[in-house]
């Protein structure tokens, strides 16, 4: 972990596809068929193992969390609705909300601003190099979700992340060791 980052983190921002939820089955057979994807969006999506427990722990400790994705809002909103989350995200930031999508840090800065927490006190979890670049550029602690959608030709060991998890169930214990419970009353 980088020594230049604070040791007190108060919020978690997550990438959507390949980090928070396994959306791959919604894409099978619909590549280049946007209308078909709009119909199937969310039908086969599932949270990665351990993610529901992570959300429950965050809620119990009043630690805000949100989704920051490059998926357009017209697909993100129905997908999250289909997941029927017990502990929904406090915010969702899509490329529609900013001028520049990840790897530019605008979306992460907007997420931190909406949570009213300095970006340097947030953690960003993602499964792509653009996620790590965006998180680092925003001054966030970055966690590489190496269980996500990583192509064979990618080299995640070159991404300059702060911490990595190889299995989605490793995320909760890691967050428990990094996060400081939020002191404000949740909204």
Image (cartoon, grey):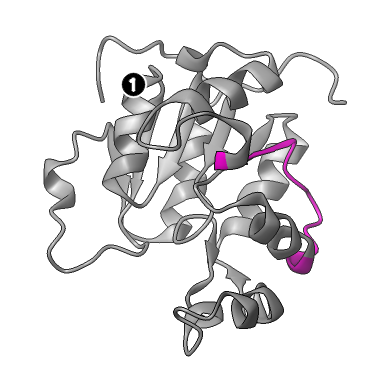
Does 63 sit above or below residue 86? above
Which contiguous range is marked in magenta? 82-95
Residue 12 is situated, as x and y percent measured from the top left of the image, at 56, 33
Residue picked out by circle 1: 137
Please report the residue visible at 11 percent of the width from the left and 42 percent of the height from the top. 158
In the image, is residue 1 part of the stretch drawn in magenta? no
Residue 43 is situated, as x and y percent measured from the top left of the image, at 69, 80
Does 149 sit above or below residue 120? below
Residue 24 is situated, as x and y percent measured from the top left of the image, at 47, 75
Please report the residue visible at 70 percent of the width from the left and 80 percent of the height from the top. 39
Q: Left or right of 185: which side holds 120?
A: left
Q: Left or right of 166: which side holds 52?
A: right
Secondary structure, mark 1, is helix
Q: Residue furthest bottom?
A: 29
Does 73 sit above or below residue 49? above
Q: Quadrant of the C terminus?
A: top right
In the image, is residue 90 part of the stretch drawn in magenta? yes
Viewer-proximal residue, 165 or 27?
A: 27
Whether residue 69 can be seen here? yes
Please report the residue visible at 84 percent of the width from the left and 25 percent of the height from the top. 186
Residue 135 is situated, as x and y percent measured from the top left of the image, at 38, 29
């Amino acid at each position: 972990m980088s020594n230049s980052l604070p040791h007190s983190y108060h919020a978690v921002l997550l990438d959507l596809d390949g980090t928070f939820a396994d959306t791959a089955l919604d894409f099978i057979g619909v590549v280049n068929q946007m209308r078909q994807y709009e119909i199937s969006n969310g039908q086969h999506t599932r949270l990665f193992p351990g993610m529901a427990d992570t959300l429950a722990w965050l809620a119990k400790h009043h630690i805000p969390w949100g989704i920051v994705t490059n998926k357009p809002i017209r697909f993100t909103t129905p997908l999250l609705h289909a997941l029927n989350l017990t502990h929904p995200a406090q915010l969702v930031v899509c490329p529609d909300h900013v001028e520049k999508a990840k790897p530019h840090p605008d979306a992460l800065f907007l997420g931190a601003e909406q949570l009213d927490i300095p970006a340097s006190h947030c953690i960003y979890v993602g499964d792509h190099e653009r996620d790590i670049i965006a998180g680092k550029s925003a001054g966030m602690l970055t966690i590489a979700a190496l269980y996500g959608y990583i192509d064979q030709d990618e080299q995640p060991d070159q991404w300059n992340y702060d911490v990595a998890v190889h299995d989605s169930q490793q995320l909760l214990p890691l967050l428990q060791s990094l996060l400081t419970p939020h002191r404000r009353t949740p909204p």
